[in-house]
Image: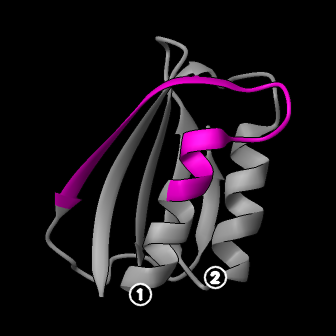
């Protein structure tokens, strides 16, 4: 199992980025959350199988239609089995 914190920069707000991440994470049985940050970026904390986390990271590098990704920063964290599901935080 793996835990990552992903920071996605660029035009990633107001393009349904969080909803696409949530839908993908749920389909992959990843737990954690996604939220918009005040600086216009999106933060994701995700826990799951390594291959599923890689698929989520790959999505973050292209995003949904309308998104313009300029940078994706992935930070490995210690897996702690903290979450029961995946949600959008506000």
* Label 2 sits on residue: 28
Q: To which residue does mark 1 refer?
A: 49
Q: Which residues are magenta?
A: 58-76
Q: Which mark is residue 3?
A: none
**Residue 14, image x and y in percent?**
79, 22
Most foreground residue, 4 or 80: 4
Q: Is residue 88 above or below residue 40?
A: below
The residue at 29%/70% (across/down) is 3
Q: Residue at x 63, y 61 (%)?
A: 87
Image position, residue 45 (x, y; %)? 40, 56
Task: Name which residue lies at 60% across and 85% down.
Answer: 29
How far from the left and from the top, in percent, is residue 6?
38, 46
The magenta stretch spans residue 68: yes
- Label 2 Cα crowd, 10 Å radius (few <14 / some 14-19 / many 20+): some
Residue drawn at x 55%, y 63% is 56
Which residue is most to the left? 78
The answer for how far apart the CA atoms under marks 2 and 1 are is: 9 Å
Asked which quadrant contains residue 80, the reply is: bottom left
């Amino acid at each position: 199992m793996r835990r990552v914190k992903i920071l996605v920069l660029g035009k990633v707000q107001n393009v349904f980025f969080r909803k696409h991440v949530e839908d993908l994470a749920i389909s992959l049985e990843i737990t954690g959350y996604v939220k918009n940050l005040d600086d216009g970026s999106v933060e994701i904390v995700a826990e799951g199988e390594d291959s599923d986390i890689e698929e989520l990271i790959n999505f973050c590098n292209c995003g949904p239609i309308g998104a313009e990704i300029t940078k994706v920063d992935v930070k490995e964290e210690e897996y702690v089995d903290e979450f029961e599901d995946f949600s959008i935080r506000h």
